Image: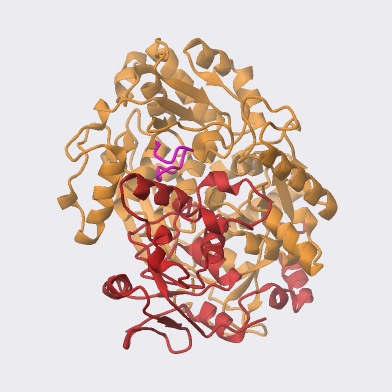
């Protein structure tokens, strides 16, 4: 399992609070048995909506093509639990997210997928978005080990909950093998739960 | 996520926290009972008592199991049904939508390969996953419940810790019956007093969401309590807990009581005989202690809650039916861009009353409001109103499960709906998320008993959704516009 300590690359800003997973990947694209091909549909309806208004969604903006870091605002990924949403973002090319806050389920999905999501203050999220907007070629480094996001010589303090942080740094973000490591312990807990034993 | 250290932790052999016997919440008791050990990350390995799967978020998980040559060690603790993509009109196979058919075939093959029960259409047990598990008595107090669906919070109505997960976590539960989880804080939300006529569980939760916002619950489990909640039936409690996730809380729960036990008694998967008394004793023991400590407590008065309708693109953007749409100045600075975006998308403006808003479509159903009591109340409104759905409006009723459908038909509710111009369908998720053929078209606006009014949620990228109770939805269907259902109910003497 691979350790994830730092993600460096160009960034793409996506603006607004409470961006839900229906907007990240509309439900019609969930009619599939594989996550393959979801990347091209990330933010599909938002992208079309912007185009209809004569505007360009950041995911369609040539300046942000190839970005590895997504910079968002608060409560990113709220709503449906669909892992298709972070999978679509990942398959578009993103490898880390910087935002003020995330929904719990979205966050759990990104940890299990190995896509770190770090927290910054609302002001810093906006500042990073502005830096990226003014120079889309600027490199953004999401430093999990150093708890900071570096952009154009500036360093912004970031946080990540201790559990996921350790998981990324140790490579234990894919939890399955550790969860299976001591199967007897699982059976022990199951055996002392009254309902597992039919309240016998 | 990891949200601060537990109160009086002593480490045991596996790092399982041991608490004193006083002052614990149900959340802490149930969590502790299911901890297998502390993982190297500091997260907890949590045993999952009931795992439900459906056709949308499980196929990739099974593929991962096969890729890694993993087995399912507790197949009896997972139950499958199909709900999201199931058509509600013509259910004959193969489905007209090839992709839907492919997903059905995948869950049939996957459940067969791994020895998991599947409630298929026609089995008499199929329906929306969060409706069928309680119907069968699978959901019980004191359990941990997980499902690849955010509305798993519904099962908290029984005093279970129930939360949605993604597909990689579905893989983990299948392969290990456990998950890597952080501990949540607990917020107690008390609602006290008697609800007025025309005010329902749906209005209660929409009111709470409005007060606490869509992100106010991030990092929390919500414990719903107070005399209003205690007086609710299990079906009403499920409506409240169902939408905890819309407030950012990964789970919501209600302490089990006599109402809970009475609902469970006699259900196919509930304990019976000598086991019943032992079960009730254990269920009582997991309820929050009277001196339990909470991260915080908020209180609301039932008398302040009106029939509520959302006006925006987030479930916390709602008003009482006779209240004007709020102005941007009513919100904190940081929220104002979202409010402006909502006005623009919905084509509504500050100061406007929702009771002037015409609707094109009315959807009654979903895991929020697709149970028998919901349908009874909608049918009662139709009968009291006496009129028919105008031709300009498409109104359809989707029972939450095959059992709900059968029960409704035995009571003649289908005939009431049909007589008043509503369509009567087969069980499924339908237009709550519009993965099946039931969709809004273009800029259509719906009054919907579902749980999300997000942009594009109901199948049209520019479609609009107004979230309401089943009674308010029926009223909107019959009047062709948002209408205060109390005007209709008053004809019935209440």
- In the rendered structure, the answer to whether residue A13 lies left or right of residue A26 reads left
The answer to whether residue B457 is magenta is yes
Q: Residue at x 18, y 40 (%)?
A: B350
State how the image is colored: by chain
**Image quadrant occupied by the C terminus of chain B:** top left
Question: Would you say residue A124 is visible in this rendering?
Answer: yes
Percent x, y for residue A136?
Answer: 35, 73
**Which residue reaches farthest front?**
A62
Percent x, y for residue B318?
Answer: 30, 42
Closer to us: A165 or A38: A38
Q: Colour of chain B?
A: orange
Q: Which residues are magenta?
A: B452-463
Q: Quadrant of residue B477?
A: top left
The answer to whether residue A72 is magenta is no
Q: Residue at x 54, y 41 (%)?
A: B259
- In the rendered structure, the answer to whether residue B7 lies left or right of residue B77 reads left
């Amino acid at each position: 399992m691979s350790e994830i300590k730092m993600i460096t690359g160009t960034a793409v800003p996506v603006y607004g609070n409470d961006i839900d997973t229906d907007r990240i990947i509309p439900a019609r694209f969930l009619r599939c048995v594989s996550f393959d091909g979801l990347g091209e549909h990330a933010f599909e309806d938002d992208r079309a909506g912007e185009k209809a208004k004569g505007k360009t969604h950041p995911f369609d903006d040539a300046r942000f093509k190839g970005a590895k870091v997504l910079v968002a605002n608060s409560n990113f990924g709220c709503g449906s639990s669909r892992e298709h949403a972070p999978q679509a973002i990942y398959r578009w090319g993103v490898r880390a997210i910087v935002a003020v806050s995330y929904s719990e389920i979205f966050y759990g999905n990104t940890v299990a997928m190995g896509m770190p999501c770090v927290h910054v203050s609302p002001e810093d999220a906006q500042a990073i978005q502005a830096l990226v907007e003014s120079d889309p070629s600027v490199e953004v480094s999401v430093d999990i080990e150093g708890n900071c996001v570096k952009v154009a010589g500036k360093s912004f303090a970031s946080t990540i909950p201790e559990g996921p942080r350790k998981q990324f740094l140790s490579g234990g973000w894919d939890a399955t093998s550790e969860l299976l490591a001591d199967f007897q312990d699982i059976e022990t807990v199951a055996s002392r739960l009254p309902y597992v034993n039919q309240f016998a | 996520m990891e949200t601060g250290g537990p109160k009086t932790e002593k480490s045991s052999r596996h790092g399982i926290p041991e608490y004193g016997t006083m002052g614990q919440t149900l959340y802490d008791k149930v969590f502790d009972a299911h901890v297998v050990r502390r993982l190297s990350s500091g997260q907890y390995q949590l045993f999952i008592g009931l795992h439900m799967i459906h056709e949308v978020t499980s196929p990739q998980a099974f593929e991962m199991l096969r890729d890694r040559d993993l087995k399912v060690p507790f197949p009896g603790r997972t139950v499958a049904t199909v709900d999201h993509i199931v058509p509600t009109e013509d259910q004959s196979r193969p489905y007209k939508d090839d992709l839907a058919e492919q997903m059905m075939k995948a869950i049939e093959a996957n459940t067969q390969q791994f020895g998991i029960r599947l409630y298929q259409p026609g089995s008499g047990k199929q329906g929306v996953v969060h409706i069928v598990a309680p119907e069968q008595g699978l959901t019980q107090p004191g359990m941990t419940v997980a499902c690849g669906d955010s509305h798993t919070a519904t099962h908290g109505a029984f005093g279970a810790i129930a939360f949605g997960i993604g597909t990689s976590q579905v893989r983990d539960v299948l392969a290990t019956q456990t998950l890597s989880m952080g501990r949540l804080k607990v917020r107690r939300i008390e609602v006290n007093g008697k609800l007025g006529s025309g005010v329902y569980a749906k209005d209660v939760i929409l009111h709470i969401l409005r007060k606490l916002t869509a992100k106010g619950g991030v990092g929390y489990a919500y414990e719903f309590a107070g005399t209003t909640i205690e007086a609710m039936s299990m079906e009403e409690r499920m409506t409240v807990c169902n939408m905890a996730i819309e407030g950012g809380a990964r789970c919501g729960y209600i302490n089990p009581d006599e109402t809970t036990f009475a609902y469970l008694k006699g259900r196919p998967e509930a304990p019976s005989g000598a086991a019943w008394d032992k079960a009730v004793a254990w269920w009582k023991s997991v309820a929050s202690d009277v001196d339990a400590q909470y991260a915080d407590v908020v209180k609301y008065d039932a008398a302040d809650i009106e029939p509520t309708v959302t006006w925006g693109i987030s479930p916390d953007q709602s008003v009482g039916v006779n209240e004007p749409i709020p102005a941007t100045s009513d919100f904190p600075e940081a929220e104002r861009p979202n409010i402006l975006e909502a006005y623009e998308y919905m084509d509504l403006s500050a100061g406007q009353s929702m009771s002037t808003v015409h609707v094109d479509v009315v959807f009654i159903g979903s895991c929020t409001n697709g149970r028998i009591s919901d349908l009874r109340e909608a049918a009662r409104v139709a009968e009291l109103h006496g009129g028919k759905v105008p031709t300009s409006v498409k109104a359809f009723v989707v029972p939450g499960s095959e059992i709900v459908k059968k029960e409704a038909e035995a009571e003649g509710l289908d005939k009431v709906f049909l007589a008043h111009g509503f369509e009567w369908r087969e069980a499924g998720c339908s237009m709550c998320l519009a993965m099946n053929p039931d969709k809004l078209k273009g800029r259509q606006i719906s009054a919907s008993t579902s749980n999300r009014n997000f942009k594009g949620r109901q199948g049209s990228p520019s479609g609009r959704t107004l979230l309401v109770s089943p009674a308010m939805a029926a009223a909107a269907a019959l009047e062709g516009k948002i209408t205060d259902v109390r005007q209709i109910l008053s004809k019935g003497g209440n």
